[in-house]
Image (cartoon, grey):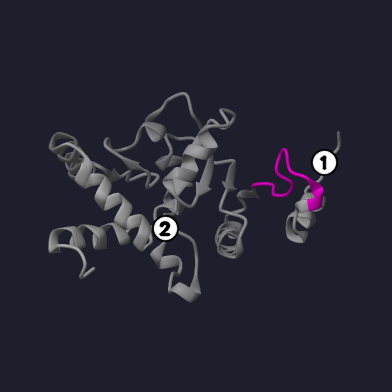
């Protein structure tokens, strides 16, 4: 960064801290900001500060929200007998886009990863067990808990851990089906995906 003035170099360094942003992308973002009018940059900076000041974790499901509990937890139209466990808040959005799921959510904010030093205590699991009691769920008994973690090593490990954790309770714990994505060509599907597709086959 010696080729740039100190303020520009600092801005590039800050952009490089963002996930998925390398040196060249950070430079492009920094110079994009420099080209924008002051009012736009102030608006951008204001949005960053506002989101840090106003967004909190929902004390029920751990969703990111500006009202606590969040809108999903307080929606009277949602089915309180089903909870879908996802890794991140943006996974919740993906499920909601289907318009077919009307239950509640629980966000873990990560997955188990011993290699990265992430164990059960680092995930937001502590408030899951209390939610399963009817007295903490507006008197409604939980009938099913859907584990919708990603179909990778860490997601599978997390799903298995949650299943083992809840097994003594006798609660129905299900895993989202995995296999062939819609529109995919069999020729280009890897063996793990094909195996999952065959395992999760159903009658037509």
Residue 87 against residue 139 in the figure, above or below: below
Where does residue 173 sit, x and y in percent of width and height?
Answer: 62, 50
Furthest residue in direction right, as rendered = 204
- Image point (48%, 28%), residue name: 78
Left/right of residue 197 with respect to residue 103 in the rendered view? right
Q: Nearer the viewer, residue 117 or 136?
A: 117
Residue in the image at 64% along x and 47% along y? 176
Estimate the spatial distance between the alpha carbons at disc 2 and disc 1, rounded to whole Å: 38 Å
Pick the quarter of the image with the C terminus: top right
Question: Which mark, by number, is residue 121?
Answer: none
Left or right relative to 2: residue 197: right
Mark nearest the camera among 2 and 1 is 2
Please tell me whether residue 112 belongs to the stretch shown in magenta: no
Tell me the SS state at disc 2. Answer: loop
Residue 140 image position (x, y, % from top left): 49, 35
Q: Position of residue 106 (x, y in %)?
A: 46, 46
Region rendered in magenta: 176-187
Query: Which residue is rendered at x = 41% and y = 27% of the image?
Result: 75
Residue at 57% in and 48% down: 148
Q: Where does the N terminus fall, quadrant-wise?
A: bottom left
Reading the image, the residue beneath label 1 is 202
Does 152 sit above or below residue 182?
A: below
User: Magenta stretch: residue 186 in it?
Assistant: yes
Label 2 Cα crowd, 10 Å radius (few <14 / some 14-19 / many 20+) = few
Residue sitting nearer the eye, 78 or 196: 196
Magenta stretch: helix, strand or loop mostly: loop
Q: Which residue is mark 2?
A: 20
In the image, residue 66 above or below residue 160: above
Q: Considering depth in this image, is 64 or 43 the residue closer to the camera?
A: 43
The residue tagged with tag 1: helix, strand or loop?
A: loop
């Amino acid at each position: 960064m010696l080729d740039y003035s100190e303020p520009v170099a600092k801005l590039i360094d800050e952009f490089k801290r963002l996930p998925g942003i390398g040196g060249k992308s950070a430079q492009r973002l920094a110079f994009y900001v420099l080209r924008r009018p002051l009012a736009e940059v102030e608006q951008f900076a204001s949005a960053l500060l506002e989101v840090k000041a106003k967004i909190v974790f929902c004390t029920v499901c751990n969703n990111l929200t500006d009202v606590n509990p969040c809108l999903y937890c307080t929606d009277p139209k949602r089915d309180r007998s089903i909870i879908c466990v996802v890794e991140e808040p943006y996974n919740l959005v993906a499920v909601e886009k289907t318009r077919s799921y009307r239950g509640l959510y629980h966000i873990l904010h990560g997955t188990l990863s011993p290699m990265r030093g992430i164990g059960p205590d680092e995930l937001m699991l502590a408030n899951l067990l209390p939610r399963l009691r009817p007295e903490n769920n507006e008197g409604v008994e939980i009938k099913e808990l859907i584990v919708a973690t990603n179909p990778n090593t860490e997601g599978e490990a997390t799903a298995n851990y949650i299943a083992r954790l809840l097994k003594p309770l006798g609660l129905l714990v299900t895993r989202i089906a995995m296999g062939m994505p819609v529109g995919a060509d069999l020729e280009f599907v890897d063996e793990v995906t094909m195996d999952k597709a065959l395992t999760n086959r159903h009658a037509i």
